[in-house]
Image (cartoon, rainbow, N blue to C red):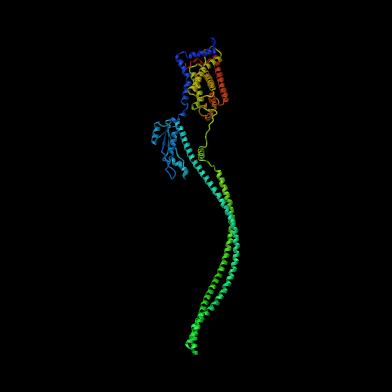
């Protein structure tokens, strides 16, 4: 139905605001309720951000059970006994990343169940053996056992996974550093041996050159020897022929001498018989014995001479026989010498050919030793001649080659500062939403008096809006001074917070003007939608498609982004878009609210005549 015009005194916007404020503080209970609703953003945003200001700094206070069941490995020759489990435990306790408690397996299990430990890490009995197996024939990975107890805290499991990753990274870095150190030391030793081999190769080059020169001279000597043996062979052949002729002559001479010797020997043998025959013949002639004896005496002198001649002849015959035998041997030796010189000539010819091959091989060897020396010297130069300190630095770099150098163009100071934009934006909505539980959206008196809809809407917007500004100012002070969050552009941060609360006021005002308590409920639903789509915690790109689409539209997303840019020193150009979107929402919501107020000044619905369920 059309509203009947009623004439009432003209109310201005400030008067409508003051009237509503006086109503809100008209009693102690209403004033207390207003105060409680004003500090709602502080209670919500401030307390939550205080509780989560910097949880990562408190990780050293998280109790963790550390069980070292590692049996280590015994000493082996020059290698000492070792227990890497104990080494890791000492490093972890010294590092203080968590509140480590080195306990037994039974104590760890009991502590988890009693909430004495958030999680437990166990280094098993074969931990060291598995790590050391990398240098053996059966390499295997070492295990790190993680035991969690989600009944105590679910997030503790996520933190435990990070802790195990740190342990694994630390052990891997240590093992890699040791392996790299061993490798680099081995390379350094190899380089030293190559240098020594190069020096030996240099001496080998000199020796090979001398060998090549010697083989050249040997070839020349072998050629001369071959020529000499040819001459010797010719001489030996001539000697063999002459010796054969001499041996033949000596054989003839020996035969003649043997015949002479036989004759002389026979003559000598016949002397006694001849003497007896002469004695007989002389006696037969009638010579007396004395005369016969005298004759025989003279004949005995001749016989003695014959005997002496026979002895000399026999000696000469024996010498001639020896000469003949020696001539034969000489002839045979000359033949053997001739044949031997022939064999020697053939051997020397082969030697000459072999020495030629040896000469060529020696030349190749000399050239090869030069190449070997040059290659060894070049190879030694290719291997860095590093000191022990340099090798240690290289081993550290090989074990951990990547250093993360984080440069943040815009960086939050800590975990709480990272969440501040989201909870600040959300606290602003909750604060305005709570205020509309007691603040009247519009002045019914002004509507009844048919005042200007724009003024009525402006008053209905400014009353909770100013209270929202107070809320945001108080929350800003808490963020800056109570929690100590650094802000690169504090005035910009405060400005976007104030614009946000004024925008929220316009939106919830429009919902209340058009739908009353239902509109207030819609405001709650809208808050929930913005809570999950604003991208305040995880990146908004991880949202499901419909929620990601809402992120691009709903105002809280732009409040969060604007606060981030101002707080962390980000891209101020983006804040212009954020502010423009919020202003668009503000103006659109204000216009919609004004249309609703205009409708109420000209028409009445049954809902307008029913009392509010909020009183």
Residue 457 point in image, percent of width and height = 54, 16
**Image quarter hosting the N terminus:** top right
Q: Is residue 11 above or below residue 574?
A: above
Q: Please tell me whether residue 449 is drawn above or below residue 214 in the rendered image.
A: above
Viewer-side residue, 199 vs 57: 199
- Which residue is found at the position 57% from the left and 64% from the top? 343
Q: Is residue 521 visible?
A: no
Q: How many marks?
A: 0
**Quarter residue 545 falls in:** top right
Residue 208 in percent (x, y) is at 57, 52
Question: Residue 612 versus residue 331: which sits nearer the camera?
Answer: 331
Q: Is residue 173 visible?
A: yes
Q: Nearer the viewer, residue 532 or 363?
A: 363
The spot of residue 252 in percent (x, y) is 56, 76
Query: Looking at the image, is 211 positioned above or below residue 162?
Result: below
Q: Hey, which quadrant is residue 407 in on the image?
A: top right
- Give the x, y percent position of residue 62: 43, 30
């Amino acid at each position: 139905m059309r509203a009947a015009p009623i004439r009432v005194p003209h109310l201005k916007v400030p008067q409508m605001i003051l009237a509503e404020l006086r109503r809100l503080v008209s009693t102690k209970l209403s004033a207390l309720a207003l105060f409680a609703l004003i500090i709602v953003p502080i209670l919500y945003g401030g307390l939550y951000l205080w509780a989560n200001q910097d949880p990562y700094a408190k990780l050293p206070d998280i109790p963790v059970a550390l069980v070292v069941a590692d049996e280590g490995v015994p000493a082996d020759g020059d290698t000492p006994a070792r227990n890497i489990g104990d080494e890791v435990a000492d490093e972890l306790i010294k590092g203080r990343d968590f509140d480590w408690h080195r306990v037994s397996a039974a104590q760890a299990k009991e502590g988890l169940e009693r909430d004495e430990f958030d999680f437990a890490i166990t280094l098993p009995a074969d931990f060291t053996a598995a790590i050391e197996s990398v240098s053996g024939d059966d390499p295997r990975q070492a295990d790190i056992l993680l035991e969690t107890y989600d009944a105590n805290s679910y997030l503790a499991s996520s933190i435990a996974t990070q802790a195990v990753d740190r342990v694994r990274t630390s052990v891997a870095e240590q093992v890699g550093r040791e392996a790299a150190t061993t490798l680099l030391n081995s390379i350094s030793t190899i380089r030293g041996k190559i240098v020594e081999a190069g020096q030996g190769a240099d001496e080998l080059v000199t020796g090979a050159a001398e060998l090549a020169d010697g083989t050249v001279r040997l070839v020349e000597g072998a050629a001369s020897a071959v020529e000499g043996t040819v001459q010797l062979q010719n001489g030996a052949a001539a000697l063999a022929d002459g010796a054969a002729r001499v041996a033949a002559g000596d054989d003839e001479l020996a035969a003649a001498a043997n015949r002479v010797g036989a004759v002389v020997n026979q003559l000598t043998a016949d002397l006694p018989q001849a003497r007896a025959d002469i004695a007989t013949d002389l006696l037969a002639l009638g010579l007396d014995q004395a005369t016969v004896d005298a004759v025989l005496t003279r004949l005995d002198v001749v016989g003695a001479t014959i005997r002496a001649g026979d002895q000399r002849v026999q000696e000469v015959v024996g010498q001639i026989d020896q000469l003949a035998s020696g001539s034969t041997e000489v002839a045979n030796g000359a033949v053997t010498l001739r044949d031997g010189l022939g064999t020697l000539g053939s051997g020397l010819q082969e030697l000459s050919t072999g020495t030629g091959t040896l000469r060529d091989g020696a030349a190749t060897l000399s050239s090869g030793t030069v190449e070997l020396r040059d290659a060894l010297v070049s190879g030694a130069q290719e291997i860095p001649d590093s000191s022990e300190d340099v090798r240690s630095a290289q081993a550290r770099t090989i074990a951990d080659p990547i250093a993360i150098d984080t440069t943040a163009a815009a960086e939050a100071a800590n975990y709480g500062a990272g969440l501040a934009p989201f909870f600040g934006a959300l606290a602003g909505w909750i604060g305005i939403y709570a205020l509309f539980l007691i603040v009247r959206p519009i002045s019914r008196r002004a509507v009844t008096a048919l005042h200007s809809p724009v003024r009525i809407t402006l008053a209905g917007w400014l009353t909770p809006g100013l209270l929202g500004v107070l809320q945001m100012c108080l929350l800003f002070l808490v963020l800056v001074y109570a929690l100590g969050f650094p802000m690169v552009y504090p005035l910009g941060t405060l400005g976007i917070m104030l614009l946000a609360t004024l925008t929220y006021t316009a939106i919830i005002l429009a919902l209340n003007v058009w739908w009353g308590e239902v509109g207030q409920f819609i405001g709650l639903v809208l808050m929930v939608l913005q809570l999950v789509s604003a991208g305040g915690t995880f990146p908004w790109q991880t949202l499901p498609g419909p929620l990601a689409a809402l992120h691009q539209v709903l105002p809280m997303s732009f409040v969060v982004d604007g606060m981030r840019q101002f707080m962390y020193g980000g891209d101020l150009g983006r804040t212009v878009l954020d502010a423009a979107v919020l202003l668009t929402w503000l103006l659109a919501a204000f216009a919609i609210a004004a249309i609703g107020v205009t409708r109420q000044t000209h028409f009445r619905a049954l809902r307008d005549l029913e009392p509010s369920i909020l009183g």
